[in-house]
Amino acid sequence: MHYRLLSLTLFSFPLAAQTESSAVSVISLLSGLLLLSFIYLFKLKFDLHKLRKSRQAKKAGPLGFYSLHDDISGLPNKFFLQQQLEQLLLRAPEQQYSLLLIKISRFEHINQLLGHSNSNLVLAQIAQRINDQLKPAEQALTFEFRQQDPVRLCHLGGVDFAVWLDSSDKPHLAEYLADNLEKNVPEAMIVHGCAVDYRLLCGIAHYPEHGSQLSELLERAYLAQQHHSVLQGKSQVFTADMLHYTSDRLALMAGLRQAITDGQLALYVQPQIDMQSRQVLAGEVYLRWRHPTKGLLTPDVFLALAEEMGVIYSLTQWVLNEAVAMLATLNQAQLDCKIAVNISSKDLLHDELIDSLEQLFEKYQVKPQQMMLELKESALVANPEKAMSMMQRLHRLGVELALDDFGTGFSSLAYLRQLPIQHVKVDCSFINELHKSDMHSAITGAIIDMARNLSLGVIAEGVEEVEVEQKLLRMGCSRGQGFLYSRPFELSGFAVWLKQWQQNETTAP
């Protein structure tokens, strides 16, 4: 207002007065303009100083807004959470609490698709969705209110968020919220015509059961989150056994699921030979994983992980398909030979195993009698009645059954009589030292005698020397498998190998 009055004063001199002395008028006008400029610059400098002081006051000290909130989402940050917990646990250290850790999965694809600035906007929107979903959760720690809406989500940085819950009255509240968030929040967003897809992954640690410090609880919740991510469908809550999972092991578990879809699996085969006639009776297949960085991995490295992850049946289905397809190839080449496949206890208890085998036999026009399934004694322990029922169904289908690693388990003779099996495999730990140890020789002889009394065929695994082969023949075992005949090789070359073996044995003196 003062500027306007001054301007009016300067420019409202009578025209006659101005004509009396043009020099005086110009000087007066310039003086007025100079004074106006000086006042304006003084006021601007004052306003800038005031604004700077305001910003400094906002940032100053540990309680400033920017030191307690994330720059991207505007949500309370880890430091804010730490401050709140210190006060909360000081007031009620005996309470039961839960830390719910939330991660936005697949966000790196959003970064690549939209760029950094746009992905930050998406991150803020997802964070708002999560916080909106937490409105009914009155047990969650409320950091502040915005337009009367509670803010209950903490942004730890990057794509990680946290919620602190009072779980004294509801010990499973964190799990309920985790399931709710994972199911209901991830709805695709349309940004610049692109559908942005993402997932939420949760991990939970309980206070004071899993730790009394925020850093410790975050570490435990992160382990639970990793475990939940790899073992899909498993609980999000931390357990002590998760401490044994190294980062390498978790990475291996995560890669195994991808290996099935990316064609990284391969089958190798090792022949089983009639040691008297030299005829190839069967070929046992072994699963291998062509890992992109670790090279060729054997089953002992990843099969136990596959069972933990719940993907063992998918692996078995792939193996069975490849095995039956090879039987069809052998039939076309007029080569008579069985294929043996190992199946786990979980495979044996899977109701769809019989149906899938029947479909494969129909698809490739292969007789069930050409397939042999090898089972370990441990497969019969978990659920004996179900295992027996499944084995009887497989037997009626015409599939041959063999009990693997025979002699290392605890099956009673009475129980063995009930099993619809045709063969037992003597473990290689007995066979390797057969001609060097009287004890191994005695055990192997007893196993062979017991199997023959039960009218079962015996397969000796791990035959590497001619002396071992000859001793097994004298004991009454005629089928052998081991390096003496062949090391495992890729299944794709089995038909060619089989033809060469037959030719060599036919022309041998």
Image (cartoon, rainbow, N blue to C red):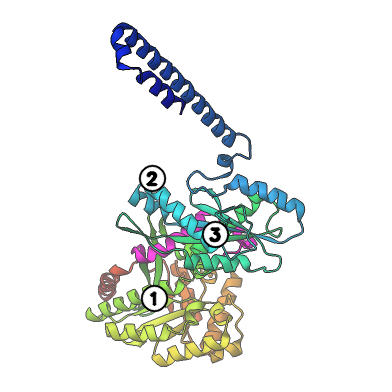
Label 3, label 1: how many angstroms apart (C-alpha)?
29 Å
Name the amino acid, label 1: Gln
Q: Which of marks 2 and 1 is nearer the N terminus?
A: 2
Magenta segment boundaries in residue numbering: 236-265
Q: How crowded is mark 2: few (under 14 residues within 10 Å), some or many (20 or more)?
A: few
Label 1: few (<14), some or many (≥20) within 10 Å? some
Query: Which of the 4 quarters of the picture holds residue 288?
Result: bottom left
Q: Position of residue 468 (x, y in %)?
A: 48, 70
State the SS at label 2: helix
Hey, which residue is sitting farthest front in the picture? 16
Name the residue: 50% across, 62% down: 229
Please tell me whether mark 3 or mark 2 is closer to you in this view: 2
- The residue at the point 38 percent across, 45 percent down is 117
Q: x%, y% of residue 439?
A: 61, 72
**Mark 2, residue position:** 117
Residue 225 is labelled as 3
Asked if the magenta segment contains residue 360, the reply would be no
Task: Give the residue number, with chain letter if any, for mark 1.
Answer: 317
Q: Earlier in the sequence, mark 3 or mark 1?
A: 3
